[in-house]
Image: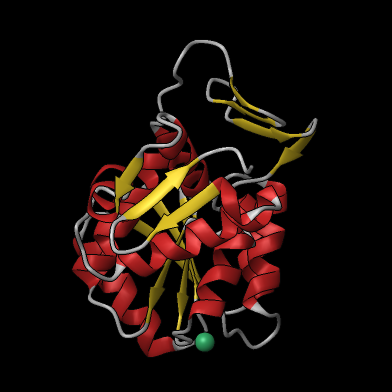
Amino acid sequence: MRVLVIEDDASVADGILDGLTQANIDSLHVSTGAAGLDAMASFSPDLVLLDLGLPDMDGTDVCRSIRAASHTPIIVVSARDDEIDRVVALEMGADDYVVKPFGMRELVARIRAVVRRTSSTVAEPGTPRTFGALVIDIRAQKVMLAGAPIHLTAKEFDLLVYLSAEPGAVFRRSDILHDVWETTWYGTTKTLDAHVAAIRKKLGHPDWIESVRGVGFRFGEPA
Ligand code: CA
């Protein structure tokens, strides 16, 4: 596995590179957004760790540029820990989001989970699921709304597929985290909320995924 690390803070980058080496993951470190975009072609990473605060470009623009050109999974590494940034990061195509400071064991686990998820999503045969104007084509990994394609990140897609398997059924947070994120780590509950918010916004109506207070979420066609 090859990981591209786009991070301008040398001490943070050193820690990440050491941890990746110990985990037997090849890595390349660059410290600017422009060098990161160059390395997408020359290094062809399996995953990108992207710092949002870069000297030459805003990390969000780097993320969008990568996403516009490829499906390479991106984990945003940020010092900014607030819900807005999480939502923005996930909306612009990142697959996961970690906040500094973080432990290397956690980061490596997240890297492996994202790569496993994005590379091994098994196509489920059968006809696309249709809910009114919404069509979820699992085999083609596509979502269409009123005939227009909706771009979801890999994780958003997985979550939508998971919830739409049983419209109207309430899925518990802990089950979603276990089944979709393959984790029970407490912090991911915020990630779950950010993904739900992103899907709602992309689908143009909050009622596609209804919050069930204290329990979890329910998928269904808006009334
Ligand atoms: Ca930085």
Residue drawn 57% across the image and 46% down it? 208
Question: Which quadrant does the C terminus fall into?
Answer: top right
Q: Is residue 167 visible?
A: yes
All told, the count of numbered labels is 0
Relative depth, front residue between 65 and 88? 88
Q: Residue at x 71, y 70 (%)?
A: 61
Q: Is residue 190 above or below residue 120?
A: below
Looking at the image, residue 98 sits to the left or right of residue 67; the answer is: left
> Percent from the top left, x then y, of residue 193?
43, 64
Q: What residue is rendered at 55% in x and 78% in y? A: 85
Taking the image as drawn, is residue 116 in sight? Answer: no
157 and 165: which is toward the camera: 165
x then y, percent, for residue 5:
46, 68
Residue 89 position within the rendered picture, expressed as x and y whole percent measured from the top left: 57, 68
Q: Is residue 67 left or right of residue 190?
A: right
Indicate the position of residue 95 as horizontal and vertical percent values: 48, 56
Is residue 82 placed above or below 156 in the rendered structure?
below
By what rule are the colours in the image chosen? secondary structure
Q: Is residue 12 left or right of residue 196?
A: left
The answer to which quarter of the image holds residue 143 is top right
In the orientation shown, which residue stands out farthest toward the top? 126
